[in-house]
Amino acid sequence: MTVVHRRFDVLVIGAGGGGLRAALQLASQEARVAVVSKVFPTRSHTVAAQGGVNAALANVTPDNWQWHLYDTVKGSDWLGDQDAIEYMCRTAAERVIELEHYGVPFSRLDDGRIYQRPFGGQSQHFGGAQAARTCAAADRTGHAILHTLYQQNIRCRTTFFDEYFALDLIQDEEGHVLGAVTLEIATGDVVVIEARATLLATGGAGQLYRTNTNARINTGDGLAMALRAGLPLQDMEFFQFHPTGIAGKGMLISEAVRGEGGYLVNGDGERFMSRYAPKAHDLASRDVVSRAIYTEVQEGRGCGTERDHVQLHISHLGEAAIAERLPGIREMCQTFLGIDPAASPIPVYPTAHYMMGGIPTSRDARVVVPAGSGEEAVPGLWAAGECACVSVHGANRLGGNSLLDIIVFGRAAADDIERWLQEAPYHRPLPEAAVARSLQRLEALEQDDDGERPAELRKAIQATMEQYCGVFRTEAKLQEGLAQVQALAQRSLKLRLSDRSRIFNIERIEALETQNLAALACATVASALARTESRGAHSRVDHPERDDAQWLRHTLYFHQPARLEYKPVKLRPLTAEPIPPVERIY
Amino acid sequence: MRFSIYRYQPESGDAPSMQPFELAVRPGMMLREALLALRDTDPTLAFRHSCGEGVCGSDAMNVNGRNVLACTTPVDGLKEPVQIRPLPGMPVVRDLIVDMEPFFRQYRAIQPYLQVNDPLPESEQRQSPTERQRLDGLYECILCGCCSTACPSFWWNPDKFLGPAALLQAWRFLADSRDQGREARLDFLEGPFRLFRCHSIMNCVEVCPKGLNPTRTIGLIRQMMLREMG
Ligand SMILES: Cc1cc2nc3c(=O)[nH]c(=O)nc-3n(C[C@H](O)[C@H](O)[C@H](O)COP(=O)(O)OP(=O)(O)OC[C@H]3O[C@@H](n4cnc5c(N)ncnc54)[C@H](O)[C@@H]3O)c2cc1C
Ligand code: SF4
Ligand code: SF4
Ligand code: FES
């Protein structure tokens, strides 16, 4: 096997919004930056984000970052760290304005300022009237942001390694991260990329579930790399199910549809959300709306001949508004459902969407591990975006806060890395054995003649997660689920490739991804089993109440051997008044 | 349903060939799903794909002679056997996977980023809804390559003629009220090849899966050139 070595100041793994925001900052400061991505950058999943990015610009309704902070803490069901949330909400306006300066084609108000729309969980005056905080480029905001960031990286001459698959982090005996081992997909060559600082920005793992809104590439590779390096994952039991995926298919119908005035209707023609959220109605937070839809369908009030979904109505907005504000949604409905939402309602059902958990980081995006009574940073390693857990989303993410998360903490990572590069001006020597583990994993794949096909095992993982670790969870189901995913993880170590080619071997990539998914399935189910309360997206039928006395704390999952630890939630913002936990009503 | 799919595996030493496949398709099935089902029977069949909803631009390919995204192409109504080939005119890496570098090189060449020389305001640069509307039909491009690889002028001169996708993006920035790079952009587009190799054959418009119209923008660039450069 050919092994090539390359050296950079900074290695960014992932070319979604998080990775590209960081890379842009560093490259414009003259650092030598390598960005590795398993797909061409603009194919990254950020491109699919529709509705928008939150910032209290107050362009449409009165607004300020303190209200945004309050909404985010409440949305998180108090599991979010209030210091990180304050940091995000306070810097939001500056970060979004920066995007506009880079060229993002935001929709505009008549006076030329950025258009903002209402989204779920947004309020004025700490729980009062609905706010309009989500800055939008029609319903293609992620596309607009990702392409713009890529374009600006072209300007700054960032070095791109397109279609390279990251296998493992490289660490020396003292725990310093020195880069990563990657595989060039087109040639099958192993490329070792050394760097003084490494940023994981590999995105989420929606592929854990069979029906999901995520791209095929969202297999949580960076999280599994962290687990293999002995690092923990935080709050993995919190997985968001978006209320409005296209029923039976999974493609996302953005919350922007409800933000623009769309509403949900059950089989009896009733606007049922008013029963579940008397004030916010259809714009309650996502966990609340998803559970409401499940309940309606479970109790026989679904729509259609199978009564297995509900309907989302927007035709009353009128053709012109739909064409201007929701053209992408309309196109998707026409392509995949053969209907025009300007004329007929959209059949929707909750769908796996977003991973609140991830690699634990500090506010400056450094990866942190427990040490003594506190925590310490892993030298040379940062994480940002959906793969990280700072934690700003806690037990439930608000719509529009993830695009914000990636640009705020992508930038924060870059700023911190810049400081680090001053302090650590040299590359540390690469330990001989650093690459061996990855090579072994690749060799094993070449050699096994029995074992399962990667595609089959991936399907088994997805079906198991859906059945045992979906929206409503119980001890018995999770117990059974844990036994199953652990067995699947074992089986994932022995996979059989029908394709032994070096050149663009997709099956090999799928095998590596499946191993990663299997590890994350274990992390998710084990964390969910232990948490005997209901909070945000984690809904335990056998423990229906939130239990702050015991569970106002973050889960940390370690792999091989599997074990759980906990750490306290940060309940004090940096400067604002703390927002103490109360019952969560929308 | 019967398929005939282009297979090429450079390590094998064999020449490219068309391989027959058969699949029981479901109503409403998209071509990408059909290809994935075929991969279950033959995991060596290689093609790119990701989002499954027509926004990432990964799975452009040539189907019955026409460039499409597999994920937004229903199999119903496709003439059998469905002939699936890699995008025309591009170096084939393997099976349906082509080397897109000639396409991306032309994209990078037009300096596809907003250029502002004036000091930036503290808040957003203002842009009226009408000015913003000029970017509609331009910024939505997903860089799939369907258009440029359907363009005869691009086939003959992939290194000299920018091709419809890159030209559409050139106009995206020329049309942006915030951009101040107009003069240099137009200078770059001068000459017999980069822009003027377009013979308005319109293949590009016909195939764009996002319904964009590169031919129109090429015309608009020409008009702007005449106006501004005399
Ligand atoms: C359909 C949809 C709509 C959404 N809409 C919104 C919205 O309106 N507002 C909002 O705030 N949020 C939205 N979200 C969420 C938000 O888009 C994502 O959380 C966010 O874009 C993630 O960005 P990221 O940079 O962390 O990762 P991604 O954009 O997923 O990028 C991950 C990158 O890592 C690379 N990578 C991964 N593994 C490897 C590997 N092993 N080797 C090399 N490279 C690798 C990938 O190639 C990719 O470049 C939406 C999500 C979905 C699914
Ligand atoms: S109109 Fe111009 S760019 Fe489009 S296909 Fe024809 S020659 Fe190519
Ligand atoms: S203009 Fe259309 S066909 Fe051409 S690259 Fe863009 S989206 Fe694809
Ligand atoms: S898979 Fe993304 S465009 Fe088809």
Image (cartoon, coloured by chain):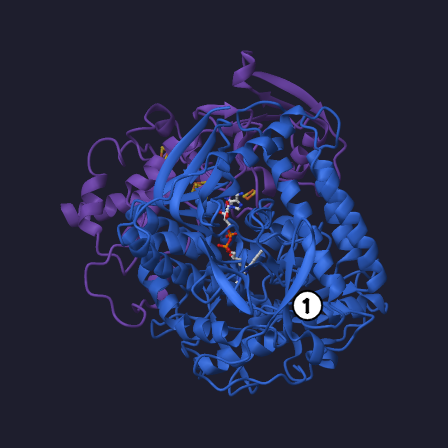
Chain colours: A blue, B purple
Q: Which residue is mark 1?
A: A537
Tell me if residue A78 comes above or below residue A314 in the rendering: below
- In the displayed structure image, the side of residue A118 where residue A586 appears, left or right: right
Residue located 75% across and 81% down the image: A275
- In the displayed structure image, the side of residue A54 where residue B199 appears, left or right: left
Dot 1 lies on which element? loop
Point out the image quarter for the C terminus of chain A: bottom right
**Camera-nearest residue between B115 and A8:** A8
- In the displayed structure image, the side of residue A533 where residue A46 appears, left or right: left
Tell me if residue A155 comes above or below residue A90 in the rendering: above
Q: Amino acid at mark 1?
A: Ala
Q: Image quadrant of ligand 4?
A: top right
Query: Is disc 1 surrounded by few (<14), some (14 to 19) or many (20+) residues within 10 Å?
Result: many
The total of numbered circles placed on residues is 1
Residue B230 placement (x, y as % from top left): 13, 45
**Camera-nearest residue between B121 and B55:** B121
Residue A297 placement (x, y as % from top left): 81, 66
Question: From this viewpoint, is residue A398 visible?
Answer: yes
Tell me if residue A166 comes above or below residue A331 in the rendering: above
Residue B5 placement (x, y as % from top left): 61, 23
Residue located 75% across and 26% down the image: A450
Q: Chain of mark 1?
A: A
**Camera-nearest residue between B27 and A526:** A526
Determine which quarter of the picture holds residue A102.
Answer: bottom left
Determine which quarter of the picture holds residue B25.
Answer: top right
